[in-house]
Amino acid sequence: MNFIMPHLPVLQVAIPLIAAPICVLFTFGGHRKLAWLFTLAVSWVCFLIAGALLSRVLLDTDISYAIGNWPPPFGIEYRVDPINAFVLLIISGISAIALPFARLSVEKEIETDRHILFYTSYLLCLTGLLGVTITGDAFNIFVFLEISSLSTYVLIATGVRQDRRALTAAYNYLILGTIGATFFVIGIGLLYMVTGTLNIADLAERLQPLSDNRVVHAGFAFIVIGMGLKLALFPMHVWLPNAYTYAPSLVTVFLAATSTKVSVYVLLRFLFTVFGPSYGFVNLTLEFVLLPLAIVAMFAGSITAIFQTNAKRLFAYSSVAQLGYMMLGVALSNIPGLMATILHIFNHALMKGALFMALGCVMYRLGTISLGSMKGLGRSMPWTMAALILGGLSLIGVPGTVGFISKWHLILGTLEAGFWPIAILIVASSLLAVIYIWKIVEVAYLENEINQEKTLNEAPISMLAPLWVLVILNFYFGIDADLTTWVARNVAETFLGGGS
Amino acid sequence: MVDALISHYNYWLIIILMMLGLYVVVSRGNLVKKIVGLNIFQTSVFLLYISLGKVSGGTAPILTGKPEAFSNPLPHVLILTAIVVGIATTALGLALVVRIRESYGTIEEDDILISERSQDASDINGSSA
C-alpha cells in the first residue's frame, strides 16, 4: 500500500484513462453487463482515491506530483489542494452513485450494440473531468477539457434513440464548446507569451508584477469568456437546455452534477490563484461583468423554467439559474460569498443529481418526461415522485436541505459586501423556483392519471436506491453542514488570503 | 504606427484569420460550412502559438554543441496536441452532420429549425391531448 500512496494523484486520472480502451475489448463477445460492472468498479476506485486525497490534503499539506519525475515548472505538475480534492470527490462520488442507476437506464435508452462504446465514452469523460481538476498545468487543463468535451458530445448524441434532436443538441454544443475551449487556449497562449510558463503556481508568481500589461488583460478576458461558455454563464448558456434535455438520463445526471462545476472550478482557479483579487481588472470584471450577469441568470433561468412543458428542460433552465448563484458568490469575492459558491458546487451536484435521476426513473417507466404525461404519477410511482419533490425543495432552499445552506451563505456574502438589495433578489428568485416546483406537484399529485388502461409500476429498486441515497444526502448535509462548511471555509480562506 | 503594423504582421494576419473563422461559424447556416469556419478559427490559434515560439535569428532547436540562439520548441509541441484535438473535433462534428442529414434530410440550419419547431409543437399538443 505504501508503494501506491505517493502515486495516487496520477492514478486518479490514469486509471479511468487506461480503463477506457480496455472497456472497448468487451465488444468481443458483446459482454455488455461486464462493461457496466467494469465501469462501476473503476468509478468506485476513483472515488476511493479521491477520498484518500481529500483526507490527506485536509489533514496534512498540499500534494505536488511531478509527472514523469520532471520537476515543475518544467514538467507537468499535478497539484492537489483542498479545493480541487473537494471537486475530485464530487465528480467521482456522483459517478460512483450514478452508475448503479445506469444499467437499466442505459439498457432502455440506448441501442444495444452501442452500450460498450457508451461506457467507454463515459470513462473518457470521467478522465477528462478528473484531469481538468487535478492538473496544475494550464495547457494540460485545455487537453483534459477537450477529452471531456469530445466524449460529452458523443454521450449527448447517443440520446438519438429517444429523440433525433439529440443530434442537433450535440452539434450545437460541439460548435460552442470548441469556441469556448479555443478562447481558453488563446488566453493561455497570451499568458505564456508574457511569462514563458504554463505551470499555474509559477504563472501566479510571474504575473504579480505584470498587472498593467495589456497582453495579460487580453489573456484574462479570453480565459473568462472561454470558461463562461463552458460553464453556461447567462448569455452563453444557449447550448445547455437542449444538451441536457435530449441526452440520455444517465448523461444528464452526470453532466448536470459535474461538468459545469468543473468549469466553475477552473474559473475560480484563474480568478483567485493565477490573477488574484488584488488585480484591479479582476475586481472590475467581478463587479461589473460577472455580478450583473449572475443576477440576470438567476432570473432569466428561473423565469424561463416556469414556462417549460418538458420536465428535463425545466430543470436545465433551473441549472442556468443555479449557475447564476455560483457566479454571484464568485463575484462577491468575500469569504461567505466564495464559501457559498464552493458549497453550492457540492450541494447543486447533490440536488440536480437527485432530480435528474428521478426524471430518469420516470423516463424508464413512461418513455417520456413531458409534464403533460406525468399527470397523476404521484400515485403510481410514489417513491420516484417523492424524491423529485424533495429534490425540488432542496432546489428552492427550504431550511433543512442543502439548498438552504448555500443560499444562507450567499445572503451573508451579499450583506457583508453591503449589497443588501441583492439579498432580496436572491430570495425573490428562490420564490420563482417555488413556482416551477409547484407545477410538478400539481401535475403529479393533484391531477388524475391519464393512462388508466395500463398500470404503471414503481421504478426498479436498482434505480431507486441511488436516487434515494442522493435525496438523503441532500438532507444529511442540509442538517449537518459542519463538514462541508469547514472545507468551504478552508478553501475560501486560501483563495482570498492571497494563497499561492 | 506603420512600423507597429509591419513588425507585428504575423499577429495582424492571425487576428484577421481568427475573425474570418468566427464570422463563418456565426453567419453560415450550412452545418459543414460551420465546421470549416471552426477549423479556420482553430488554425489561427495554432499559428499564434507557432509564431510566438520564433526567436529572431534563431535556428532549429537541435543540440549542436555550439552556443546558438534557437527557436522555442515548446509552443510547437503544444500545438501538435491542439492539432490532434482539432482533428478529433472535426471528425466528430462531421460524423454528427452525417447523422443529422440521415434523420432530418438536410444540413441547412434553417430547415432543421423548422422541422424541430413542428416537433416541439407536436410534443406540446401530444401531451395535452
Image (cartoon, coloured by chain):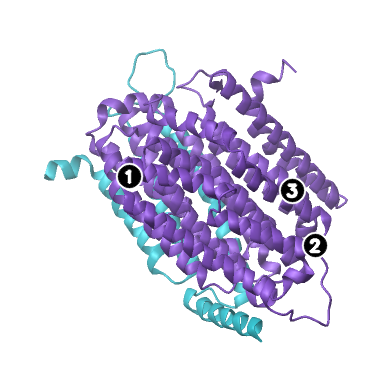
Q: Which chain is indicated by disc 1?
A: A
Callout 2: 10 Å neighbours few (<14), some, many (20+)? many
Do the CB atoms of the residues marked 3 and 1 lie less than 8 Å apart? no
Q: Secondary structure at mark 1?
A: helix
Q: Secondary structure at mark 2?
A: loop
x and y, in percent, of residue A36 in the image: 79, 48
Mark seen at residue A99: 3
Residue A383 in view here:
yes
Residue position marked by numbered label 2 in the rendering = A459
Q: Which one of the lettered chains is coloured cyan?
A: B
Callout 3: 10 Å neighbours few (<14), some, many (20+)? many
- Tell whether A202 sits left or right of A262: left
Mark seen at residue A286: 1
Q: Are marks 3 and 2 on the same chain?
A: yes
Residue shown at 49% from the left, 54% from the top: A322
Q: Between disc 3 and disc 2, whose residue precedes?
A: 3
Choose mark 1 or mark 2, whichever is in front: 2
Q: Secondary structure at mark 3?
A: helix
x and y, in percent, of residue A140 in the image: 51, 35
